[in-house]
């Protein structure tokens, strides 16, 4: 039994350290402040496709216990810093997501997240492309819309297709088992995208998928030109989702409505509702500057930089060795 040993080779760990150093230099040269925020918080994430790991604090001041959530992203805390006047910020941190394990997933993983006040989504995509091209020594990223990706790969318009049409498409591609699981259009679109589009796009150069459906807006603004879509984008390369970014929603009332809608969907899916992060809403009400932000999977970027086939090859101690 050699479970005490790291799953990554020492050479891969050296390459990992070199990539992290390169990232820090990239942001230092651009005068972006490095920050740290807590991994534990009183509030979790309401997104129906994410789940927090939780713990209970019973120390001084909380004899009856305080439920705390390991964060799936530092997003909420970083936005509180932005509202407090931090200016452009970045963070390299650990994040945690329950129910995620596999070739590209470990329940504890590393995120690079940054926010740029005054940047549009397109400006942040350009900066992200510059970073990824520098680290991976690849061409700059292409940009296509979510709608264009569906039309090009599957000849179907995701903005107008109905549930029956999406189910039929899954059945045509021998995914009838997925089609039978839900009547929710949003969920069907996500399955189609992950199963039929993600594996084939961005093989020769990185590619941003831009303007996701409004139902998948998360914390992004809706497009002023087309309210059916959001100012949200994701970056892919060689079948790997690398990053998820937004032109950030700054309105506290709209954000609260989205949190409540998330909890409504959670009830429909028989999932536990999540307490709404009142600290984030207070920060938005106080005044979050117009900004764009992005979270990039650092372990996945390092996989591409090193040629690793599994995330365990770039982690010292993944779940089965920690």
Image (tube, grey):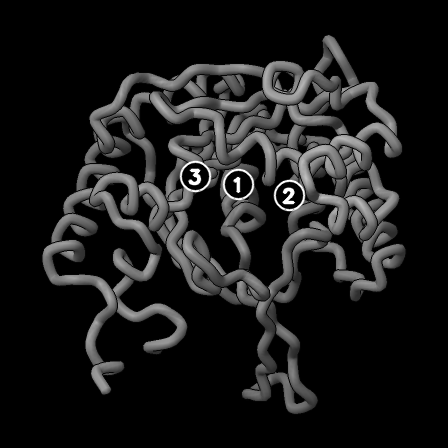
Classify residue 170 by image quadrant: top right
Give the residue drawn at x 52%, y 51%: 73
Residue found at x 79% / y 44% = 179
Q: Position of residue 287 (x, y in %)?
A: 64, 33
Q: From the viewer's perspective, is 200 left or right of 221?
A: left
Which residue is label 1 attached to?
Answer: 84
Structural crowding at the residue carrying mark 3, measured as other residues with C-alpha within 10 Å and reported as few (<14), some (14–19) or many (≥20) = many
Location of the N terminus (image quadrant)? bottom left
User: Mark 1 touching mark 2, by CB under 8 A?
Assistant: yes
Relative to 152, does residue 26 appear above or below in the rendering? below
**Nearer-the-camera pick, 151 or 58:** 151
Q: Secondary structure at mark 2?
A: helix
Q: Which mark is residue 283?
A: 2
**Tally of numbered tags:** 3
Can you identify the residue that label 3 sits on? 240
Which quarter of the picture shows residue 225? top right
Q: Is residue 12 left or right of residue 318?
A: left
**x and y percent of residue 184 in the render?**
84, 42
Which residue is nearer to you in this view: 79 or 53? Answer: 53
In space, the residues marked 1 and 3 are separated at their CA atoms by 35 Å
User: Mark 1 vs mark 2: which is more N-terminal?
Assistant: 1
Instruction: Please tell me which residue is depicted at 89% across the width and 55% down the height of the picture.
Output: 268
**69 w.r.t. 186: above or below:** below
């Amino acid at each position: 039994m050699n479970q005490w040993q790291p799953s990554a080779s020492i050479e891969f760990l050296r390459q990992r350290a070199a990539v992290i150093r390169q990232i820090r230099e990239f942001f230092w040269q651009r005068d972006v402040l490095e920050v740290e925020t807590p991994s534990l918080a009183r509030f979790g994430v309401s997104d129906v496709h994410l789940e927090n790991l939780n713990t209970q604090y019973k120390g001084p001041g909380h004899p009856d216990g305080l439920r705390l959530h390991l964060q799936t992203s530092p997003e909420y805390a970083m936005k509180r810093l932005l509202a407090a006047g931090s200016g452009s910020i970045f963070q390299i941190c650990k994040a945690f997501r329950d129910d995620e394990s596999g070739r590209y997933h470990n329940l504890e993983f590393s995120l690079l997240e940054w926010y740029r006040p005054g940047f549009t989504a397109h400006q942040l995509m350009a900066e992200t492309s510059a970073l990824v091209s520098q680290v991976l020594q690849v061409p700059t990223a292409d940009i296509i819309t979510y709608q264009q990706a569906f039309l090009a790969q599957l000849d179907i318009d995701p903005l107008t297709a109905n549930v029956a049409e999406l189910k039929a498409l899954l059945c045509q591609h021998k995914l009838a088992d997925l089609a039978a699981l839900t009547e929710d259009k949003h969920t069907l679109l996500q399955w189609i995208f992950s199963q039929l589009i993600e594996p084939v796009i961005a093989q020769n150069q990185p590619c941003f998928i831009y303007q996701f459906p409004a139902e998948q807006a998360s914390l992004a603004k809706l497009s002023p030109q087309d309210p059916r879509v959001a100012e949200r984008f994701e970056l892919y390369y060689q079948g790997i989702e690398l990053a998820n970014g937004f032109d950030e929603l700054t309105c506290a009332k709209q954000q609260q409505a989205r949190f409540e809608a998330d909890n409504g969907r959670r009830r429909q899916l028989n999932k536990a509702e999540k307490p709404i992060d009142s600290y984030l809403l207070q920060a938005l009400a106080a005044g979050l500057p117009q900004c764009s932000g992005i979270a990039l999977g650092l372990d996945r970027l390092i996989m591409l930089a090193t040629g690793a086939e599994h995330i365990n090859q770039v982690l010292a101690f993944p779940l089965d060795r920690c």
